């Protein structure tokens, strides 16, 4: 979460006021080594959310961490980093694990419903590959923490499957093609909103009611308005700053396949949630140990392998 948004970092007055917070991003923050001695390692599920999970674990055990004032990090807006299907998979899987570890039962139920809503929003706006990657992340989560350990042992085979899905992702330098661009923004008329709801944003409409292919919706990466992609056969999600984007084609078969599978998976997740919660919380105490990391990553204990001249031997 963001604290003191918009504060003037050049002013001591803006950094003098204390504000409680439950975790810090691992850019410029610090905490006592006693935290590591008691809590162990982060969860061995990489790519995003590691700092959030560890920070929540600290807070729940009564430890505090704090930012290093006067230091900062400048990077591209987070919305510009959301174009990769890899991040959709690993980011969603880690968020759901954190939810099972740290959220209440009520919040978890909300989270599972949000998961369905997020996938539904993507398939409604023709982002089928993105929705499929999110579905895969959710299905991997439901297999339980023991499946995560097995993934590490057969990592090449597992990630080959991810790589095959990524081949369908086309994020390249591009210029918007000739033709009419969608008019975005503004208030959607009531009749249009009704049609969008009744036809699942056009997925129940016959093809003859769609706009001609010469009219292509050219939308921003973060555009989720159903009206802006309604009745378009082709939608281009384009980032004007980097001139990169994705081209998506309307596909009824893919839409209904993902919709049906996601609905079933969400129901299964809600039923299994109490069991999954206990499994992940029990496994967490083992997965954060140094021994677990060494075992899974096959890294020897260097402290017992030092050579006579006190140099650490090469292991990589």
Image: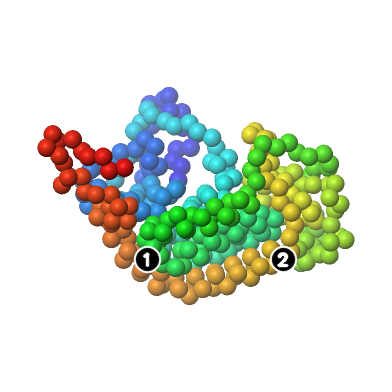
Q: Quadrant of the C terminus?
A: top left
**The disc label shown at residue 185, or none:** none
Q: Give the vertical position of 13 relative to 290 (above or below).
A: above
Residue beneath the point at 38% across and 32% down: 15
Residue beneath the point at 41% across and 72% down: 274
**The disc label shown at residue 146, or none:** 1
- Of all residues, the one furthest to the top in this rendering is 10
The answer to whether one can see residue 39 in this image is: no
The local crowd at label 2, few if under 14, some if 14 to 19, many if 20 or more residues have their Cα within 10 Å, is: few
Does residue 35 appear left or right of residue 53 in this picture?
left
Does residue 206 appear left or right of residue 71 in this picture?
right
| In the foreground, 155 or 49 | 155
Q: How many dots with numbers?
A: 2
Residue beneath the point at 22% across and 52% down: 38
- Of all residues, the one furthest to the left in this rendering is 308
Question: Is mark 2 in CB contact (under 8 Å) with mark 1?
Answer: no
Does residue 258 appear left or right of residue 228 in this picture?
left
| In the foreground, 256 or 152 | 152
Residue 5 location, x and y as percent?
A: 48, 37
**SS for callout 2:** helix
| In the foreground, 99 or 284 | 284
| In the foreground, 232 or 61 | 232
Q: Quadrant of residue 239?
A: top right
Residue denoted by label 2: 253
The answer to whether one can see residue 87 in this image is: yes
Residue 96 location, x and y as percent?
A: 46, 59
**SS for callout 1:** helix
- Of all residues, the one furthest to the bottom in this rendering is 271
Residue beneath the point at 67% across and 36% down: 173
Residue 28 location, x and y as percent?
A: 37, 35
């Amino acid at each position: 979460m963001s604290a003191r948004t918009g504060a003037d970092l050049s002013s001591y007055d803006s950094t003098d006021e204390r504000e409680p917070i439950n975790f810090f991003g691992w850019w410029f923050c610090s905490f006592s080594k006693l935290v590591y001695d008691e809590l162990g390692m982060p969860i061995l599920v990489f790519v995003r959310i590691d700092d959030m999970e560890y920070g929540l674990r600290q807070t729940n055990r009564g430890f505090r961490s704090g930012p290093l004032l006067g230091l900062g990090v400048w990077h591209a807006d987070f919305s510009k980093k959301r174009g990769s299907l890899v991040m959709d998979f690993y980011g969603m899987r880690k968020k759901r694990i954190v939810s099972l570890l740290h959220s209440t039962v009520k919040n978890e139920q909300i989270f599972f419903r949000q998961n369905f809503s997020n996938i539904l929003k993507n398939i409604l706006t023709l982002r089928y590959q993105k929705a499929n990657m999110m579905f895969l992340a959710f299905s991997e989560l439901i297999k339980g923490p023991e499946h995560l350990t097995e993934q590490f042992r057969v990592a090449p085979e597992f990630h080959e499957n991810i790589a095959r899905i990524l081949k369908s992702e086309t994020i390249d330098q591009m210029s918007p093609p000739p033709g009419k661009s969608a008019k975005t923004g503004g208030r959607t008329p009531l009749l249009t909103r009704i049609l969008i709801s009744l036809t699942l944003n056009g997925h129940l409409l016959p093809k003859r009611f769609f706009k001609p292919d010469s009219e292509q919706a050219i939308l921003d990466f973060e555009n989720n308005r159903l009206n802006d992609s309604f009745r378009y056969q082709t939608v281009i999600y384009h980032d004007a700053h980097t001139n990169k984007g994705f081209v998506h084609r309307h596909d009824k078969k893919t839409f209904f396949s993902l919709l049906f599978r996601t609905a079933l998976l969400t129901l299964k997740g809600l039923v299994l949630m109490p069991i999954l919660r206990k499994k992940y919380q029990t496994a967490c105490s083992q997965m954060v140990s140094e021994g677990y990391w060494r075992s899974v990553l096959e890294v020897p204990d260097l402290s017992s392998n030092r050579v006579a001249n006190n140099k650490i031997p090469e292991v990589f």
